[in-house]
Image (spheres, helix red, strand yellow):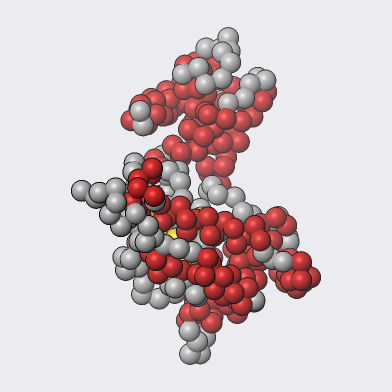
């Protein structure tokens, strides 16, 4: 057991009583993780600086021309920002890291920052998920990484992921975190990823980092041509959500909680329904009976008639959603 006058285990050089004793409920790893997160957040708050703004906007314009028919401007700007920092003007990140290493006191944090000199782009397919990490297989080479999850929202196996990554500070091999934009692609767009892989394989000798740097616009254009518009749900999932929202709006009701539960249910359970409306109808009964929106004077039969489905179909997904929701308690 560490004494109050012993050197603090976090490596700050201070005595425990003057350092992490007040944070005794937190592990050293948690303290380090919070500090690393602050460093990343501060970077995006400070940059790009005014002197780099015209160059950044010029790059946004270059990307917007071929992509604006597929993606909204805000998403294009978010994608281009990482491209600008890590492919176009990497010295901005390099200089920021040097400044941070001079400011940071904890040796353990400085050690992590020394591994952060070269953020890299990563595109892969989720092959496994646990409470803290996702296992993601690189689509362009034989590599599987462990990427830290950013929330408790369910992540289905089979979706693809795009992000820039850095070592996560855990000192474990192949453990990473996403720097900023962690983008998930619904399974509707698997063919676009296959075409991108074929483009890479058809190239003459070229490294993966070099190919990704030179073909960023081509990657997003392939997705756009395949119907991707920035949405996080499959067309079927989006259809279920839209039908449920239409019912609530027509009946002058709203329920963010119900919509969130439906989203998680669709992503995590992947229900194999023939019709979107069957799940939506079951969800409305589920919301009504769990008081997730202001009560309506409506029967199960009337809900089924509104969605034009049978009561048996409605009830199947009502019970399925109810079981899913109960399992989360």
On screen, 201 above or below 5? below
Instruction: Say which quadrant the C terminus sits in.
Output: top left
Please tell me which residue is depicted at 66% across the width and 25% down the height of the picture.
249
Which of 278 and 114 lies nearest the eye of the viewer?
114
Residue situated furthest front in the rendering:
5
Q: Is residue 203 visible?
A: yes
- Image coordinates of residue 198 in percent, x first then y, are 49, 76
Please tell me which residue is depicted at 44% across the width and 37% down the height of the picture.
265
Which of 130 and 324 lies nearest the eye of the viewer?
130
On screen, 168 above or below 288? below
Q: Is residue 195 visible?
A: no
Q: Is residue 326 left or right of residue 159?
A: left
- Image coordinates of residue 300 in percent, x first then y, are 49, 15
Please tell me which residue is depicted at 46% across the width and 38% down the height of the picture.
264
Q: Is residue 48 left or right of residue 320?
A: right
Residue situated furthest top in the rendering:
297
Residue situated furthest left in the rendering:
1
- Image coordinates of residue 268 in percent, x first then y, are 40, 42
On screen, 289 above or below 164? above
Which of 230 and 117 lies nearest the eye of the viewer?
117
- Image coordinates of residue 84 in percent, x first then y, are 65, 71
Please tell me which residue is depicted at 32% across the width and 68% down the height of the picture.
173
């Amino acid at each position: 057991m560490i004494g109050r006058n012993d050197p603090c285990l976090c490596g700050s050089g201070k005595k425990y009583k003057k350092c992490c004793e007040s944070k005794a409920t937190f592990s050293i790893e948690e303290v380090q993780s919070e500090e690393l997160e602050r460093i990343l957040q501060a970077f995006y708050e400070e940059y790009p600086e005014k002197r780099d703004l015209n160059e950044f906007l010029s790059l946004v314009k270059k990307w917007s021309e071929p992509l604006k028919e597929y993606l909204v401007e805000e998403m294009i700007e978010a994608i281009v920002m990482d491209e600008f920092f890590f492919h176009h003007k990497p010295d901005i990140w390099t200089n920021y890291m040097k400044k941070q290493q001079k400011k940071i006191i904890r040796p353990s944090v400085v050690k992590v920052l020394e591994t952060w000199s070269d953020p890299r782009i990563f595109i892969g397919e989720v092959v496994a998920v646990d409470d803290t990490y996702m296992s993601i297989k690189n689509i362009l080479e034989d590599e599987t990484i462990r990427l830290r999850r950013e929330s408790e929202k369910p992540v289905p196996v089979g979706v693809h992921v795009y992000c820039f990554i850095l070592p996560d500070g855990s000192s474990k091999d192949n453990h990473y975190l996403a720097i900023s934009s962690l983008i998930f692609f619904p399974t509707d767009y698997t063919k676009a990823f296959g075409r991108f892989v074929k483009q890479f394989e058809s190239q003459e000798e070229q490294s993966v980092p070099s190919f990704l740097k030179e073909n960023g616009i081509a990657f997003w254009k392939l997705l756009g041509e395949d119907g991707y518009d920035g949405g996080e749900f499959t067309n079927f999932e989006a259809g279920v959500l839209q039908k449920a929202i239409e019912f609530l709006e027509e009946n002058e009701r709203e329920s963010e909680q119900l919509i969130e539960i439906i989203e998680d249910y669709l992503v995590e359970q992947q229900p194999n329904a023939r019709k979107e409306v069957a799940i939506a109808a079951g969800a409305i009964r589920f919301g009504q009976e769990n008081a997730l929106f202001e009560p309506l004077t409506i029967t199960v039969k009337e809900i089924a008639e509104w969605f034009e489905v049978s009561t048996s179909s409605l009830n199947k997904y009502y019970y399925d959603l109810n079981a899913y929701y109960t399992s989360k308690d």
